[in-house]
Amino acid sequence: MLFKLSWNNMKKSIKDYAIYFLTLVLGVAIFYMFNSIDSQQAMLQVSQSQREIIKLMITMLGFVSVFVAVVLGLLIVYANNFLINRRKKEFGIYMTLGMGKRQISKIILMETIFVGVISLVIGIVAGVFASQFMSVLVAKMFEADMSEFQFVFSKDACVKTCIYFAVMYVAVMLFNTYTVSKYKLINLLNASKKNEKVKIKNPFICIIIFLVAASLLGYAYWKVTADSHSLDTAEKILPPILMGIVGTVLIFWSLSGFIIQVVQNMKNTYLKDTNMFVLRQINNKINTMVASMSVICLMLFMTISILSSSLALRNTMQRELVEMTPVDLNLYKTANLKESYMKYGREVKTTKEQRDDSRISIQETLKNNKLDMKVLKDIIEIQIYTTNDLTWKDFLADKYEEVKAEFPRLDYSTAEMIVKISDYNKIAKLYGIEQYQLKDDEYIMLCNFDSMEEIINRVLIDGNNTISIVGKQYQTKYNECKDGFIQMSTSHTNTGIILVPDSCPLTEDMKEQHFLAANYNANTDEEKQEIEKIFSSGDSGFIQNLANNGLDIDGMTKISIMEASVGLATIITFIAIYLGIIFLIASSAILALKQLTDASDNKQRYTILRKIGCDEKMINKSLFRQIGIFFGVPLLLAIIHSIFGIQFAIKMMAGIASEKDLLPSATATVVIIGVIYGAYFLATYFGSKNIIKEE
């Protein structure tokens, strides 16, 4: 009997379960998708290093999944609590007919199992199909060959999903049992007659608090944008974050009284149609959900910021990766080694062999260690110079104190890197980037790192900055630094190189570094991978010869840079999407369930509207505006937070993320939020419309 009653109750209440069911299905599908990547990677033809990166990503997603499970568990408990409260009168009738609390608990238990099993099955089926698109996404991000693509079902992901959600459902069942045990018959029967207690706030105090909150947020916004350079430690970043949180809470605390005071003064608007009713309804909702609305706003802010920043980071890295890896190989070694030198803050002793090797070219070192030079082509080798007579402090000149006060952590004693113009042009020609010309008394500053470019341009902007090298004066050719680089990297990381005329009297003892750029003498990717092993594998005869001779050559290859960069960007992107969507679902579900609860509690108010002459069109319009404002207010404040938060994130990621890539990433974020948030909004509207309709 209880089984049949539970089944019939679930079918009868299917519209009430819609939001709950949607949340469970989305949660299961997303959980399965992100935990099935280990089975998807098996069919991708990727390199060993990429496979290791994918394994790292899977491990990190496993840890993130624990956090996601906790969030979803709390959300399911919250959603289930809505359903229980919705049916208090029904349970009261059961008890009146002689049914005990234990039997009611059994009914709820079976209904939970029915909904849980159905949502789990549908969610996993949806996740299995969606994970195939995930395979394509993984392959695209890692630029993998998908010639062996096939439909994949991950048994491990399925088992993991079932276990995690089974634990969540057990928690829900225990919560339901505890909740039912506290019920009293009189409270159940009169549940529909009770409303939340709403305290009327003093409008004047609300306006004061609102202005204080706006001031707090304004200062926090200014701090993380215009004054962001001062936030160079965790201790300094924390206060703006706390001000943002406090400001958000105060905004929602004061918003209801503030809005009423403002709109009431706009008589034409306040008295039009059902605006008075809508305003009072919104006022009550916000008034009783200050903490919830604040948390939802902050979760939406995190969703927007995480998704936009991570996607911008990936777009920047992808774009700059191609630009910054124009050749297959860069090698460099220190020139003129002394008996000891400082490296990473500690003294390093050198051998005679190392000192002798530092005075010869890289090509000679390669030949001396039995490298077949035929594996390389387009070889260009240059010298990079430095002198203690030209440091960052010397270059900044009269701007030094100003810059030091603003950026106290920079090392201003570092000697500037100097390169002869003809040497740089050889590299630039090989890289396919702009070449430059100089007169005998001119110099050019090259830089592509945004933060340093801003500092350098302060010095060059008046066009009359001069530097001294070996007693000779050189005038800047341009009143801004020019784009250019020598060493390959994942992004724009050149903090400054001074180009000087070939006539500049640079001496042998000023050589700081030997630098070599070259391409692999190969026509296919497979051939390039074989040459790559010569410079990267510990089993390489060349690497072993260097080790046996006590030598070491630093360097980087295009393949290793691209694989590492793609791996990092992919890990960040996947975790960001995973967390962002979960936060978005949680925020949307809480808003939806609160609105459905209010629609149920306020059903009589809509009946009164009908009695005073409002037709269904006006009532539905009133409901639509209520839900629109209810969903829109936290989203609007979250968007405002995000405008400044994303700018701060981009500045913190200076050199690896660019504001130029914010538009496409913001567009993608808008699409994701629009689909999920919009789906919950529509489901809430139609669910509320069904609840308040005239019987």
Image (cartoon, helix red, strand yellow):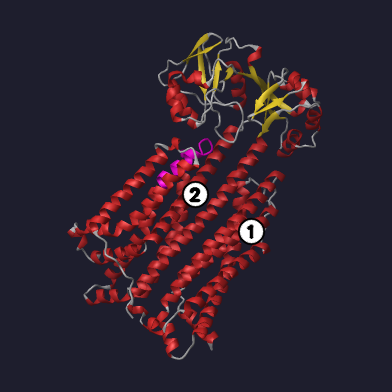
Task: In the rendered view, tell whether residue 40 sits above or below residue 5.
Answer: above
The magenta region covers: 641-662
Image coords of residue 220 (percent x, y): 38, 44
Task: Check residue 646 for magenta coloring.
Answer: yes
Inspect the image, locate mark 1, and give the three-letter code of the amino acid beneath it. Ser
Label 2 sits on a secondary structure element that is helix
Counting from the top left corner in percent of width and height, residue 481 is at 48, 23
Crowd rating for badge 2 (residues with CA inside 10 Å; few <14, some 14–19, many 20+): many
Mark 1 touching mark 2, by CB under 8 A?
no
Q: Is residue 350 magenta?
A: no
Q: Quadrant of the N terminus?
A: bottom right
Amino acid on which disc 2 is placed: Ile
Left or right of 403, for residue 656: right
Quarter of the rendering containing residue 656: top right
Q: Nearer the viewer, residue 183 or 16?
A: 183
Which disc is residue 243 wearing?
none
Name the residue located 39 percent from the left edge and 71 percent from the top edge. Answer: 597
Q: Secondary structure at mark 1?
A: loop
692 over 513 or under it: above or below: below
Rendered residue at 59%/9% (across/down): 505
Asked if one can make out residue 614 in the rendered structure from this viewpoint, the answer is: yes
Q: Name the residue carrying label 1.
A: 36
User: In this figure, which residue is indicated by the disc labeled 2?
Assistant: 306
Q: Nearer the viewer, residue 376 or 477?
A: 477
| Residue at the spot 60% in from the left edge and 26% down from the top edge | 486
> Reading the chain from its start, which is encountered first: label 1 or label 2?
1
Residue 59, position in %: x, y?
A: 65, 53
Q: Main secondary structure of the magenta part?
A: helix
Q: Quadrant of the C terminus?
A: bottom left
Q: For residue 153, say whether it is visible.
A: no
Q: CA distance from mark 1 to mark 2?
A: 22 Å
Q: Is residue 311 above or below residue 478?
A: below
